[in-house]
Image (cartoon, grey):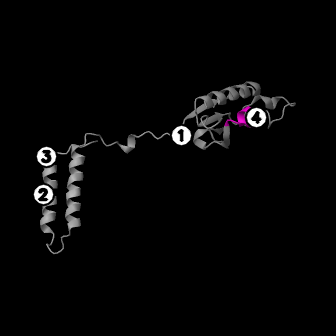
Amino acid sequence: MIKKITEKDKEDWENFLNNKKKNLNKNSIKKKDIKNLDKDKQDWENFLNNKQKIPNKDFVHKKNIRYEKIKKIDLHGYTIEEANKAVEQFIQKCFEESVTKIIVITGKGLRSSNIENPYLSKDLSILKYSVPEFIENNKSLTQLIIETNDAKIEDGGSGAFYIFLKNKLKIK
């Protein structure tokens, strides 16, 4: 908020300067001090007469700051092939939209129907394990990703993971 300088403010400043000049001991007055007082007065008058607004530093847009943009994808009910395809498309779309963090919710695999099939591995056919492996083995996706981490409990815990994307403006 910009406050206007009132006539009372100007008068107070003039009184301050005059009192400062009067209170100086005549023996200690130097020409430099008087010149500085006159310069201060001139600077103050220039400030008051200046019509430019002082920029508010809180509203100045900083170009080098990357604001966090988060998106989620929930893969519950997907097959491995559907999940891999959906994740690949989602990561590419998010990269183009300058998303910084993706939360991929795979689920824990506790209700997975693959347990009934003895020919499928219990560990590797669950999306929780297969999707991160797919991402790591896909070179086009790894070029867009900084890192992947396990999710915090509030974002899905062991049934989810984070993907941190690179800044598309810095990749050439």
Task: Name which residue lies at 73% across and 28% down.
Answer: 84
The disc, 3 or 4, on the residue closer to the chain's N-terminal end is 3
Query: Which residue is label 4 attached to?
Result: 139
Point out the image quarter for the N terminus: top left
Q: Residues within 10 Å of mark 4 (few under 14, many from 20)?
A: few
Label of residue 66 in the image: 1
The CA distance from mark 3 to mark 2 is 12 Å
Q: In the image, 56: left or right of 127?
A: left
* Label 4 to label 1: alpha-carbon separation: 25 Å
Q: Is residue 159 magenta?
A: no
Pick whichever of labels 4 and 1 is earlier in the sequence: 1
Three-letter residue code for mark 1 = Arg
Where does the magenta region start and end?
132-144
Q: Secondary structure at mark 2?
A: helix
Q: Earlier in the sequence, mark 2 or mark 1?
A: 2
Q: Is residue 77 left or right of residue 152?
A: right
Residue 165 falls in image quadrant: top right
Q: CA distance from mark 3 to mark 4?
A: 69 Å
